[in-house]
Image (cartoon, rainbow, N blue to C red):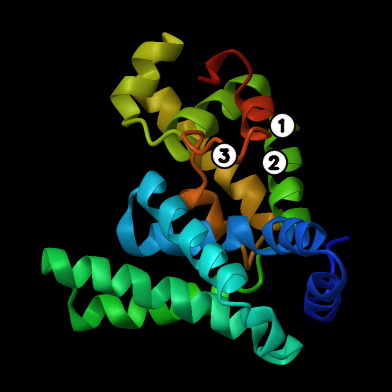
Amino acid sequence: MYCTDEEILASFQKDMEKGGRLLFNRYYKPLVLFAETMLSESDLAEDIVQDVFYDFIHDKVFLRVTPEALSTWLFRCVKHACLNRQRDRKEICQADMLLYDVAEEEARTVSPELIADIHKAIRQLPEQTRKVISLVILRDRKYQEAADELHISINTVKSLLSSGLKTLRKQFPDNLFFLFMLRTESGEMPELCDISGDYCR
């Protein structure tokens, strides 16, 4: 079970290194997943979250923020950093803003335990279904690419994908949204390797 926001802030008062570790364990993955919904770039999303963590510690925000405001502060900082990056590229529109508000609210519910549960559920799928989920969802392969790699037809890929997602939706009806954002490219998510078996990079 991850620590509460109150425990994270209290840890900073006693041991900066421990506080940083608890903050990372609780918020790194949810914040990166949220940033990826806005930027669609794993590396850039990770850089932004790391910068927010750096500012949090360097500027000693932990001395000023309350436990009730910690989550809001972190997500808003990441959101503003992503928006600034998009404005630089002139890629933002009003429809995107509405989507980001929804994504932020959903990202707040993500915990390390939830991510671990999703990974465990995928590992329990039939082998071929698990591989299709890994390639198409986790590694963003096109249907034809997955079919070629697994030496099966594209219709089989679609059928296995549909079956696998149906099973997962029953277990995670409110959180499957994040399944589509998990990527094996992130070095901070090594547990994904356990899902895909031989197909892990």
Q: Quadrant of residue 148?
A: top left
Q: Which mark is residue 119?
A: 2
User: Which disc number belongs to residue 82?
Assistant: none
> Quick check: 109 left or right of 40?
right
Which residue is more in the foreground, 129 or 122?
122
CA neighbours of label 1 inside 10 A, class few (<14), some (14 to 19), many (20+) = some
Most foreground residue, 12 or 74? 12
Q: Residues within 10 Å of mark 2 (few under 14, many from 20)?
A: some
Which mark, by number, is residue 163? 3
Secondary structure beneath disc 2? helix
For numbered disc 3, what is the local secondary structure? helix
Q: Which mark is residue 123?
A: 1
Q: Tell me: residue 88, above or below residue 41.
A: below
Q: Residue at x 81, y 58 (%)?
A: 18
Whether label 1 touches label 2, CB < 8 Å: yes
- Residue 20, x across and y down, in percent: 72, 61
Tell me the quarter of the picture where residue 84 sits. bottom left
